[in-house]
Image: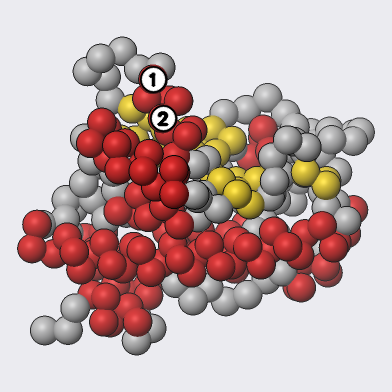
Amino acid sequence: MTSYYGRYLRGEHVTVWAELRALGPVPDDLLEDAAAVAEETMVRVSQHVSRLAAALPELGWVSSDRMVRPHQPPTDSDNALVDSLVERVGGLPLSLEACLRHVGEVWFAGDCDLLFLTHHQEPAPTTVPPGPDFPDPLCLGNAYHLAYELEQLDQGDDLTFPLAPDELRKANLSGGTHDVRLPSLHADVELHGVAGRPGITLVEYLRESIAWGGFPGWSFEPELAPEALITLRTHPDF
């Protein structure tokens, strides 16, 4: 039987991930194969993120946090930290572990007139997400964010990892977070708190984000999306 990884390389991206999710906790005899799919997926995600991070400033995009670059790829020390986190947490889903190892920190929240991002100017949005006031710029925490959250836990408690701010906070409003519940031994993991997308997983969310140039909130009102977004959009190859 052809491996999941072999099928994935042949282009069965969506089908392979659906089958991996259906496994529940990944059996030991499939772990290496499933991990290879997760690694390849996040290598590709990182390439897309790097492309977008380079393109955004050319459109006049300015980060909402001047101390954070749009993309900070992982370093050797990040990967060493991930090794310890897997043990300390008691198991990371393969998609999240690979994301921490290959994608790193992402921060596309900010302002850009060409992309209709004016969240740090007046007036503030008066609606609620999802919708055209909330483009949901892609943001991802890295291994150091997870390590920090782990340090805040009381011993024995399960961890809810806030992987990113939610649509409201990205729009400079009071809000919450997009969360991953740990530990988990699954191939992929549900991303909780994403407006209008109940049950969406990390890989699915990243696929939607890349398809919409890093701003997946526009998928809810595509006819209102800015013209400049077409220069960022692409068909995800993962």
Distance, label 2 to label 1, CA atoms, is 6 Å
Residue beneath the point at 69% across and 59% down: 53
Q: On the picture, is 233 further left or further right than 34?
A: right
Question: Residue 23 placed where, x, y %?
Answer: 17, 59
Q: Amino acid at mark 1?
A: Glu
Location of residue 169 by image quarter:
top right
Judging depth in this view, the residue of 235 and 149 nearest the camera is: 149
Question: Residue 31 placed where, x, y %?
Answer: 17, 60
Quadrant showing the N terminus: bottom left
- Residue on which disc 1 sits: 151
Residue beneath the point at 82% across and 67% down: 228
Residue beneath the point at 33% across and 27% down: 159
- Residue on which disc 2 sits: 147
Check if mark 2's residue and mark 1's residue have beta carbons within 8 Å: yes
| Res. 130 in view | no
Callout 1: helix, strand or loop? helix
155, above or below 44, in the image: above
Quadrant showing the C terminus: bottom left
Residue beneath the point at 60% across and 49% down: 72
Q: Residues within 10 Å of mark 1 (few under 14, many from 20)?
A: few
| Res. 94 in view | yes
Q: Residues within 10 Å of mark 2 (few under 14, many from 20)?
A: some
Q: Amino acid at mark 2?
A: Ala
Question: Residue placed farthest to the front in the image?
Answer: 76
Callout 2: helix, strand or loop? helix
Judging depth in this view, the residue of 46 and 2 nearest the camera is: 46
Q: On the picture, is 85 further left or further right than 57?
A: left
Question: Residue 178 placed where, x, y %?
Answer: 50, 38
